[in-house]
Image: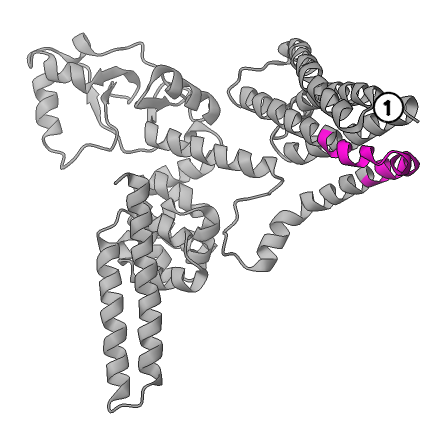
Amino acid sequence: MGDADALQARLAEVQTLLARHRLVEDLVHRQEMPRHDLVESLVHKRHLAELRGKLDKMHPADIATILEALPLPDRLMVWNLVKAERDGEILLEVSDAVRETLIASMAPAELTAAAQTLDADELADLAPDLPREVVQSLFQTLPHEEREQLRAALSYPEGTVGALMDFDMVTVREDVTLEVVFRYLRRFDALPDHTDQLFVVDRNDVLQGVLSLSRLLVSEPETEVTAVMRSDTLRFTPHDPADDAAEAFDRYDLVSAPVVDAEGKLVGRLDVAAVLDYFREESESEQLAQAGLREEEDIFAPVWNSVKNRWAWLAINLVTAFIASRVIGLFEGSIEKLVALAALMPIVAGIGGNSGNQTITMIVRAIALGQLSPDHARRLYRKELGVSLINGLVWGGLLGVLAWALYGSLALGLVMTSAMTLNLLLAATVGVAIPVTLARLGRDPAVGSSVMITAVTDSGGFFIFLGLATLFLL
């Protein structure tokens, strides 16, 4: 059974136990029997103990996925069964929207206890969602070193390497032998996750290079670190864009990389897990933005929360749909005279919208990967117009032949071909212009792009097709 299937099986088990618990508890509650309260309490505890036992065996990420798939009452019941020492890990794994519901159900003391189980870099991820008094309490209870690390992590804006880096790393000196390094490593209970290399620093913590574990294992113990370390390693600063770091990890197949300040001092470490999380979050945000959603939405959120998240672009879509309807209204007389226009015009608009969305998806991806510079925009316009011209002539020609065969009018077929070609050219132009313009204005090129391209191709497709039909057929 694959991981996804296994997770679905665990989710089904939890849902079955919750349903059985509600059913039995309801039956017991209705029965008239001696010592009713005691029986009800025993039944309640037995089912919850079985559910708690299953949760104890699950990974925090799996519990997070299960919580996201449960309605709010069931979610809170399951959440209350999780061991307190695992709360912090699970809060990090759940989506932002679900995290809000869980935090809202917890007392400040519970939140403080959960946060205290996390490292400074993990606390920095969680802190923006915690109440102010909880964050202040944490600052007072943390050791001095962790307090300063948390303060530093919170100082870096979102979307930078500093916001992703962690402080859990292993450093060694360059003037010691590998035997000394081995003895030093044996003092650890476990190495930090995703440790593929040790960071070599001088007495002032200035990074000198890296010592890979593979070189450490195959080299002679008497060899000094400086003889086998790499000094030309890739390094980042806390203010580097996270996008650039993610591209570097992808390009060079990195597992970890050092983060240094302006003076070259080692201040943290970036690992592949943080980069993958960033990739996933950016991908999800892009998908939501293209659909006009402002933020990730809990599928079981209250109705009003979902309304507020969706209304803005729906309002814009309403305006664009009204404009498209008025475009059709301009040609009511033409449609009355030639009913075939009403059947064919959605095809022109629909194909144009699909083509425009393909163009926008490609352009947004190119901008996100840093492949598109302003100097390339003109060349990109020419390329997309060429693709749309060929697609328009080929597929528009096919639709033109079908229209001719269905309605017995060669002129209608030619109008169909021409309208399809022109609308695809319009879709290509706007499909490049929207994300490029948004990027130049410093905005997210994905925000609402799907809504905007559909509005343009619908109105434009109706106007082009009905206009050509009125001009040449009527």
Residue 209: x percent and y percent? 27, 14
In reply to whether residue 328 is colored magenta, the answer given is yes
Span shown in magenta:
325-347
| Residue at the spot 26% in from the left edge and 55% down from the top edge | 55
Q: Amino acid at mark 1?
A: Leu
| Residue at the spot 32% in from the left edge and 61% down from the top edge | 16
Asked whether residue 50 appears in the rendered view, the answer is: yes
Q: Height in image: 278 above or below 46? A: above
| Residue at the spot 46% in from the left edge and 47% down from the top edge | 96
Asked whether residue 141 appears in the rendered view, the answer is: no
Magenta stretch, main secondary structure, is helix
Q: Nearer the viewer, residue 144 or 6?
A: 6
Q: In the drawing, does residue 145 fall left or right of residue 301?
A: left
Image quarter hosting the C terminus? top right
Residue 164: x percent and y percent? 40, 32
Q: How many marks?
A: 1
Residue 360: x percent and y percent? 62, 25
Q: Nearer the viewer, residue 195 or 336?
A: 336
Task: Give the quadrant of residue 291.
Answer: top right
Q: Residues within 10 Å of mark 1 (few under 14, many from 20)?
A: some
Q: Height in image: 369 above or below 230? A: below
Color scheme of the displayed model: one colour
Q: In the drawing, does residue 372 fall left or right of residue 419?
A: left
Q: Secondary structure at mark 1?
A: helix
In reply to whether residue 298 is colored magenta, the answer given is no
Image quarter hosting the N terminus? top left
Q: In the drawing, does residue 104 fall left or right of residue 4?
A: right
Q: Height in image: 251 above or below 67? A: above
State the residue position of label 1: 468
Q: In the drawing, does residue 285 fall left or right of residue 351?
A: left
Q: Nearer the viewer, residue 112 or 137?
A: 112
